Amino acid sequence: MSEKIVSKEQVEAFLDKYDDFLFDCDGVLWQGSHLLPSVVETIDLLRSRNKRLIFVTNNSTKSRRAYNKKFENFGLKVRESEIFGSSYSSAVYLRKVLNFPNDKKVLIVGEKGIEEELANLGIKYVGGTDPELNKAATEDVTAGLKRDPSIGAVLCGLDIHINYLKIANAMQQLLDPETVFLATNIDSTYPSKGRLLPGAGTIVGTLETCTGRTPTALGKPSKAMMDCIKAEFSFDPKRACMVGDRLNTDMVFGKEGGLGTLMVLTGVDKEETLQNKPIVQPDFYIDKLGCLYDLLQ
């Protein structure tokens, strides 16, 4: 069973156990546009004890640069190099794992964050925020859709402007088995202002249905993302802890990566979920991240 941290002594023992902390963001540090209590103080506490911090998010709509600005707006001092989002993970995977050819392009189904991360690593792309894909999918328009031999991969993330034309265009590329199929993440939902909305997985699932193909996922809880993080930061998994609010992504991600796990109750999953034989039990759980600071006062 998971251990709930409720005392100063437990906090001290927990902090002594780990050198590196991987944090999910939304639901852990903030909820939408609202910073959660004592988060700044907790981050400062961890830094004062020489802990290394890595911020891991499945949100593919923002690049690391854009995410860094969000941290700044919350008063959190975080370096861009400490942020590891699913868009960046996808770009790293394409460049360093697949050795994606320079003469090929990636078709993006997603937002600006993916475009920025691919561009930063010199990967050519089409689609994404291209206004040409916002047209109505009339019979004449869809008749013009065809396989583009210059496209070597389709990368799908959350696209809040998704439409039939984008799906149909991506489908034409994926019907060629030589075209690589990647997903920034396969989250079924994401939290927004206290409610859940459809996640990238709903769009990925549509492409899976019409093509019969399954993508390589590059967000939590995929092994591919963990491998990218371990390669970049070179940490000992036994001395690292994944902190998150979701059992099926954050906690599975940490457990399968050989890390310790801490679940906070300020996001998707709640305390009662832990009593109902969940997919995985975190090593520890706590009411909110800020309790690590509050309980020491």
Image: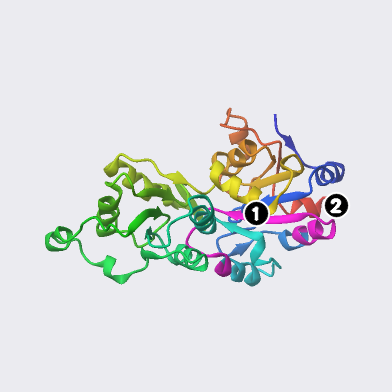
The quarter of the picture where the C terminus appears is bottom right
Q: Residues within 10 Å of mark 1 (few under 14, many from 20)?
A: few
Helix, strand or loop under label 1: helix
Rounded to the nearest angstrom, the CA distance separating label 2 from label 1 is 32 Å
Residue 215 is drawn in which quadrant? top left
Is 8 within the magenta? no
User: Where does residue 20 sit, x and y in percent of width and height?
Assistant: 75, 50
Residue drawn at (36%, 50%) of the image: 203
Is 53 within the magenta? yes
* N-term mark: 2 or 1: 1
- The reply to whether residue 17 is visible in this rendering is yes
- The reply to whether residue 221 is visible in this rendering is no
Nearest the camera: 182 or 41?
182
User: Where does residue 267 sit, x and y in percent of width and height?
Assistant: 59, 49
The quarter of the picture where the N terminus appears is top right
- Where residue 296 is drawn, which disc sits there? 2
Residue 285 is drawn in which quadrant? top right
User: Where does residue 40 sit, x and y in percent of width and height?
Assistant: 73, 63
* Amino acid on which the number 2 mark rests in the picture: Leu
Helix, strand or loop under label 2: loop
Q: Is residue 45 left or right of residue 224?
A: right
For label 1, the residue is: 232
Nearest the camera: 96 or 19?
96
Q: Residues within 10 Å of mark 2 (few under 14, many from 20)?
A: few
Which residues are the magenta region? 42-66
* Amino acid on which the number 1 mark rests in the picture: Glu
Q: Is residue 139 left or right of residue 47?
A: left
Nearest the camera: 190 or 110?
110
Q: Is residue 208 above or below residue 148?
A: above
Q: Nearer the viewer, mark 2 or mark 1?
A: 1
